[in-house]
Amino acid sequence: MTRRQPQSVFVPGRRGWEGQQGSLAGVGILVAILAVAVAAGALVWLFDPAPAMKATGVVALLTLGLGIWLLLVQIRVERVRVVRIDIGEGIARFSGAAEVRRVLRLLGVCGIALLATWVWMISTVTSTNVPVLTLLLVPVVAVLLIYGGVRAWVGADGAHVLTLRPDGVTLKVPRNNLSAPWDEVGGARLVGNRVEVSVAGGGGVSFAARDFASDPIILAELLTFYARTPHARADIGDGTLALLRDGAF
């Protein structure tokens, strides 16, 4: 199958996404508190005389900076009436923002560095001089960062992929996957800040509005169109691109 470079398409004549629903003040306050806590812990490590502790502090500050960068990148990805699509023969694929995956990969590298400094720390610093929280939390955080980084590195499309084919749809998001023929897909709709995809038998899956680098309402409308219009499925691929450019679905 010949694949082309992903392209951004502005979809005319659609209402499009109105952005994250509900106040982000609570999330912002929580993030700010966590950032201050991490920064304070990193500064304590930086001023410790042990080289291993200093190295841990440096990596922690770098990780904090990348975390803030990741949050800003995710917020600033343009999704309103914009769809980023990768097409091939009989395939239309939508994935997460490449900008986000790049930062996640860097965070994975930080996780490896954090785990290495933790091993150095417990090997060279007297246990009584290392806080219990440092001993327990640092490896957990490091493993989570490595896990996220590996998911971002494995597969060119990343951890979030929605694939449309003439015979069915495949959705891959962490902890919430779907592979079903079109006859089992009832449609999709945005509920709050998640797109819910209904499946025959009363089941269904969902993904977050920001999981993909595309307008979530337009993705939901496109899924519903193909679920309810069998004769259009044969043209999935180039036909999908034409539909999006015209807004005719």
Image (cartoon, helix red, strand yellow):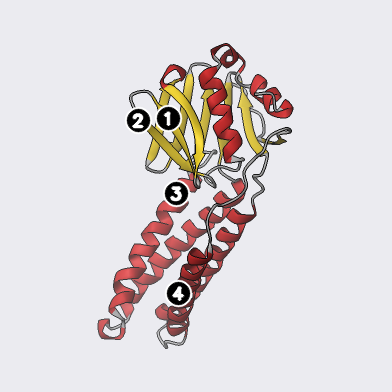
Quadrant (top left/top right/bottom left/bottom right) for the C terminus: top right
Q: Amino acid at mark 2?
A: Gly
Quadrant (top left/top right/bottom left/bottom right) for the N terminus: top right
Pointer 3: what residue? 150
Q: Earlier in the sequence, mark 3 or mark 2?
A: 3
Mark 4 vs mark 3, foreground winner is 4
Q: Earlier in the sequence, mark 4 or mark 1?
A: 4
Q: CA distance from mark 4 to mark 3?
A: 23 Å
Q: Earlier in the sequence, mark 3 or mark 1?
A: 3
Do labels 2 and 1 touch, CB within 8 Å? yes
Mark 4 vs mark 1, foreground winner is 1
Tell me: residue 157, above or below residue 117: above
* Callout 3 secondary element: helix
Q: CA distance from mark 2 to mark 1?
A: 6 Å
Tell me: residue 100, above or below residue 244: below
Pointer 2: what residue? 203
Which label belongs to residue 198?
Answer: 1
- Kindly identify the residue that appears in the image at 54 percent across and 13 percent down: 230
Which label belongs to residue 38?
Answer: 4
Q: Earlier in the sequence, mark 4 or mark 3?
A: 4
- Kindly identify the residue that appears in the image at 68 percent across and 40 percent down: 81
